[in-house]
Amino acid sequence: MERRFGGTGKDRGAGVGVATYAVVCRERVEAVTAAVADGPVGGYVLEGPGGVSVLFDAPAARGGGPVAERALLHPAMALARRLGDPVALLLSADLRARLCAVPARGGPPLALSWAAEPPLTPDPEARHARLAEWESRAGRIATLLSRPDAAAELATIRNESGPGLEQPTGDALLTRACDALILPGNAIGCSPLLHDPSELDTAIRVNATGPTPRNPGLLNRLRSRDRQAG
């Protein structure tokens, strides 16, 4: 079954609830603009502290339901290939969030996913194993994004709630992750699935001249399972 990101239920439209859909990288704006123009999907480029954000044109959803995640990943993968450097796809919806690190030259993307309702793990051994797995994945993502020294800080970003603690929003989680990885966070809270990016004063429109998007086989190997340290 295709992984989808966004609203749920038959009455929810494509992209409903998706507060953030952006691709970020540490590149010069000129290089990113050229790569988007040469790619399969156009969008809006925003230069910000630490790099550049891209708001790709929203893909169409089949049957009016939530957008298939592979359709959101495809432009990010094309951008990483053209830049020759990894990029990060940012997604959020209410209390959910996902940061997907996309390699430049082959290999499956790696993702950290924060669930709206973090699973409870009362068993100490299971909890320890879950934390170890979370920390390992955070380390691999930090390394893929050329910030291995940020692994420990990235692993501490969890959406646990409890007495005296308010569960963070998906955008708050992505902001902390971008801060840890020194990635631009200026597009967090922006989603072409919901709003017209042309309304942003600093957005540069870039039309794509590359080949028409196709279903990338690499995405079938995506192993970004929802994992949350309990």
Image (cartoon, rainbow, N blue to C red):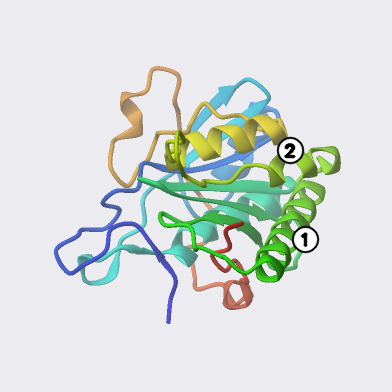
Above or below residue 147? Residue 199 is above
Name the residue carrying label 1. Answer: 105
Tell me the quarter of the picture where residue 183 sits.
Answer: top right
Q: Tag 1, which secondary structure?
A: loop
- Residue visible at 79% across and 52% down? 139
Residue 26 seen anywhere in this rendered image of the structure: no
Q: Position of residue 189 (x, y in %)?
A: 40, 33
Query: Is 46 in front, or is 127?
Result: 127
Name the residue carrying label 2. Answer: 153
Circle 1: residue type: Arg
Q: Position of residue 186 (x, y in %)?
A: 52, 26
Circle 2: residue type: Glu
Q: Position of residue 86 (x, y in %)?
A: 72, 49
- Residue visible at 67% across and 55% down? 102
Q: Give the class, few, some or many, for how many residues have Cα within 10 Å of label 1's Cα (few <14, many ≥20).
A: few
Q: Earlier in the sequence, mark 2 or mark 1?
A: 1
- Residue visible at 78% across and 42% down? 152
Q: Tag 2, which secondary structure?
A: helix
Determine whether, in the image, residue 109 is placed left or right of residue 18: right
